Amino acid sequence: MPKEAPIVRFEHISMQFPGVLANDDVSLSVGKGEVFALVGENGAGKSTLMNILYGLNRPTSGRLFIKGREVTRHSPAQAIAMGVGMVHQHFKLVPSFTVSQNILLACEPRKGGFLYDFGEARKRVEALSQTYGLEIDPDARVDELTIGLQQRVEILKTLGRGADVLILDEPTAVLTPQESEELFGVIRRMVQERGMTVIIITHKLYEVMAVSHRVAVMRGGKLVGLHETRDVNQRILAELMVGRNLEEERPERAGAPGEALIRVEGLKVRSDRGLPAVNGLSLTVRAGEILGVAAVEGNGQSELVEAICGMQPIEAGEIWVEGVRVNGMSPGKIRALGLAHVPEDRNATGVSGAASVSDNLLAGRQRERRFAAGGIHMKKKAIRAYVTGLFRRFDIRGAGVSVQAGSLSGGNMQKVVVAREFSADGRCLVVAQPTRGVDIGAQEFIHRCILDKRNAGCAILLVSADLDEVLSLSDRVITLFEGRITGEFTGASIDKQDVGYAMTGGRSGEVGA
Amino acid sequence: MKELKYLFSFPFRKKINLGYLFSLTLSVLLALLVGALIMHLSGHDPAAGYKAMLSGALSTARSRGDTLAKSAVLCLTGLAVAVGAQAGIFNVGGEGQLYLGALASAAVGGYLSGWPAWIAFPLALLAAIAAGGLYALLPGWLKVRLKVNEVITTIMLNSAAIYLCKYLVNGPLKTGERGISAGTVKIGAAFAFPKLIRLSNLTASIFLSAFIALAVWYLMKRTATGYEMKLSGQNPRFAGYIGINSGRLMLLGMTLSGAICGLVGMFEVFGIHKRFVEAVSNEFYYDGMLVAMIMRYDPVGIILMSLFFGALKIGATGMEQIGIPSEIVLIVQSIVIFFMAAENGITQSLKERLVQRRARKAARREEGAA
């Protein structure tokens, strides 16, 4: 591909966050007119690197050049002025405004100084959409558009500000396959016809193969591979992404798994957006077994978990917990069967930030006779003894049980969730992202809790974006890709690269290049 | 009694409340200062004015009785707001519920005037509860089932209820007695709440009010139901995840809120007017809302603050008696309320900003870690 002077050049960029080296001596350059793919697992440092380019983060060390000029301490506004635009995963649009109002936001054409000039606005947006071949109705309201078209508006907005380097942060995460294909067409056109540069952050390796010229692979903050796309294949990229197989000691099993406690058959679930998220999935988790689900975010694992716990409607298929069919049951009823749930999003779901730590720890048990006389009168002393017991046992660090849970650090908040859910009396556990954003010490503690529960005979479904976590804890691992199981792995040594290959769509040969 | 210990030790028991109490006191003083300035500018002696206010509220047995009666109304309406708010539903329709409760109980008390009190009185009580509660259940149901904003529906239902009552007492339910322009027939004399202090508005309904206040406090602060209401009001998503049925608690909170308002209406009828009259309430519920919001829906706080507000309202008449025009009195009163409400908003927004800043910092740290 065209390789003149690089349009963006990173030189020995490092980014130190408290406790984490998010970028570790990264050097790479992106040429004009190329589609550059940046891939890596969650937390590999891709987004950090792009945020540095876009002026959202300032690197700890290293130099950054945009169009040959060294930039230091630039803001996103300055990045845009230099032609670097970024389309985030979550769109920043005003839903009730029209397309042209959104695209021209903050640089509206005016009539007589203060009146919005609708005619001129429409003309400008039409010109813009023709220039780039991105068809759109300038007068449509944004909240009436599909997500794919909203993304198009976001791209046009960035282009309208004069960007010729476009950063797309996981652009297909929210798109249907058809919308993704359209987007790739748009990217190809922009690059071929307008000589633009596109940097695309993604997890999906077939997309890399389909659209990019070059690809960089990051792992643990380091750049571990930089290749012409035509020289590599998905298999090689997957290996680079997940790294070499470490001979890890896997904890001893307590005995053979027992009866099936969680059973899912032919499950289909739609996401909140109404797109198919889980597409005919069956699995069984037995007593004394940890079933790990390895999947890149957005491949149906969240919907699977929510469906099992009664928080997402089931479109087809059946779920049994402790032998009881739970289709259509409320979360409370399913809990009563003995299913505890560590949700993936502790801030929105797992804890109530406004409530006290004590209230959070007690939640779900408020009607138990030992805490409420006759199920009505709350026994303050018994409650206090119980929650301070949990507080100590799970080593929650905070000013005490009466402070707001929202004031705790992320790791301690997670310990509150773990303390509550792991002290439940049931035999089924669904654990999603148990150690996300949690420091190493707390991580080990939580892992220990999970293994203890397994050894005590619980059936545990473990979902995590952290592949090492899944592999080191699980007795059996399944990989999910686009809502389907793409692989199942058991045995003493699971090959990490096989898992990585399966979870990045290695077996879905029908999509992509 | 253990409960009473908590009641009287509030708010000194908790450190958090102490700070709020301090800033509240400060804002009251500030408000009185501005009030004094206004009195001074309009040519009245502020010292004499405030003295008149104090004596107007507390000097005689009658004024003390009136203050207590006023406080009871503020307290019950305030608690009605709070019990809904705790479950995450905001009842603005208390005024209408109050009217319907008053009318329903007045009808029972009027048409069953010949019946023995031990039958008619409980029936009137039930009628008030049912009228207020059911009328609140409707917007609650709309909110839970169809996600219709309860603030809008309750405001609209207020007008519907109040004008329906006005129509009824001017038409179908109008008494035949002479000299009564608009009102229902008089309730049976035996049903009325006896006056506790001559010439004052304080009646035996104060005991029922106290009982209701204690019961609401107990429900909100000491029961598993109250705990569930709090959790689901604070974070419905969390509540759903933990297995609490938020919708049912909203309905409960709303119905209780309406029932309390209905009872307030009945107490007015059976204590003061002895029949339903158009002026049964003078926007009592909105005053209660103010008290509840200033005290952040804390039941004990509402009980205490309603005493202060009651004194403020009754004391105003004392100021009028020494020649300060009622308009000035109303201005001073509004300023006091304004400052207290503003204090709430200002510290709240400062606190929120602090929390947000902390959260942003934490998020940035986490982003870095991820």
Image (cartoon, helix red, strand yellow):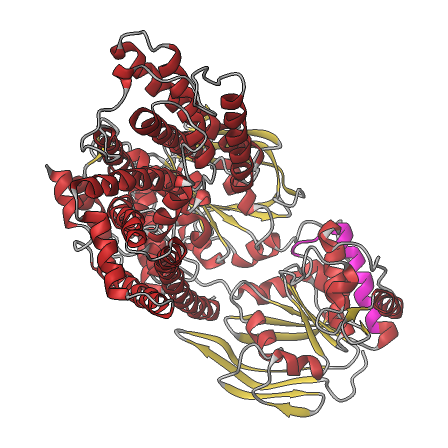
* Image quadrant assignment for residue B255: top left
Residue A400 or residue A57, whichever sits in front = A400
Quadrant where the image shows the C terminus of chain A = bottom right
**Vertical relation: A218 (above or below) B147:** below
* Image: B358 above or below A162: above
Task: Give yes or no for residue A426 being in the magenta stretch.
Answer: no
| Res. B313 in view | yes
**B322 vs B63: above or below:** below
Q: Which residues are magenta?
A: A173-191
Residue B297 placement, left or right of A284: left
Q: Position of residue A214 (x, y in %)?
A: 72, 73
Q: Nearer the viewer, residue B198 or A141?
A: B198
Q: Quadrant of the N terminus of chain A?
A: bottom right
Q: Please tell me whether residue A181 belongs to the stretch shown in magenta.
A: yes
Q: Position of residue B100 (x, y in %)?
A: 45, 26
Q: For residue A443, say whether it is visible.
A: no
